[in-house]
Image: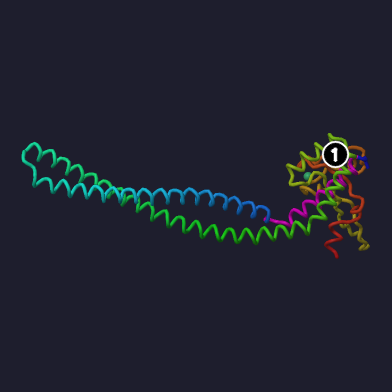
Amino acid sequence: MLTELTRLVILQKIDLRLLEIKQKKGDLPQIVDTLSHALQKLDAELTVDTKRQKEITLEITRLDNQITDDKLRLTKFQDQLYLVTSNKEYDALTSEIDQMKQDIDKSEYTILTLTDEADKLKESIKSKTLSHQEKSQELEIRAAELEKMNQYTKEAHEKAMAERENVLEMIPLRYIREYDRIANAKEGIAIVSIHQMFEEKVDKKGNVEYIPGQVFCSGCHKIVPPQKAVEIRSGNQIIRCEFCGRMLYQDESSENRTSNEEEIF
Ligand SMILES: [Zn+2]
């Protein structure tokens, strides 16, 4: 078989091991990532909410003080009403009193609106804090699981990566590019073996014979034309599956295995 092809097969076997390691971790890395992001978002929201809460408290205090002052001035104006001597003075004072009343009403209304906002904010902060606690706890558990899994798979991962580096150095770049392109499009599987089917034939005497039948691509399970199968077996060039585009090779170790035998045993 072509040296490049042999090395690509080795590369694929290493990558399958790496894929297996990744699959062992399952959704854990994704879950940890999602939880971390959700917590960051909650942190940011809680910071904004808490800041607004403080602003509201300060604003309500300021308005309360203003109302107290305004009410004092109002009482003073109302007392002065009894002391006025002219209509002009009376009208001016009445106008001041009306303005003061309007100001007080406006402040009180603003306090109501702000109190309403503060109540809603309090509820929101409460539920976000609770959610934050739950997510933090879950993250702690999941991150510990992932860490444990990483330690467990670290050695196997490092070994596979070192082997990968070695084999990559021995493959021309254009083959690696081709391999990567197919692997990216086909869930990490760029090169697959062909699979020979055997048909069971019983002669008149009852003797069973197995006759080579069709050849399949073990990646997409579609038929490989006989001429192509011959070329693949010769191993002199890289042949691709017409259907899935993966590179094909003849796996010597599985040469004698047939699906019919598998069915029999
Ligand atoms: Zn195929």
Residue 158: x and y, percent?
Answer: 82, 51
- In this orientation, which residue lies closer to the viewer: 263 or 69? 69
Label 1 residue near ligand 1, CB within 8 Å: no
Residue 195: x and y, percent?
Answer: 85, 50
- In this orientation, which residue lies closer to the viewer: 222 or 79? 79
Q: Quadrant of residue 165?
A: top right
Please provide the residue range marked out in magenta. Answer: 4-27
| Residue 214 in view (yes/no) | no
Query: In what element is the residue under mark 1?
Result: strand
Image check: 184 left or right of 42?
A: right
Q: Residue at x 40, y 54 (%)?
A: 120
Quarter occupied by the C terminus: bottom right
Q: Give the residue at mark 1.
A: 239
Q: Residue at x 36, y 48 (%)?
A: 59
| Residue 85 in view (yes/no) | yes
Image check: 169 left or right of 143?
A: right
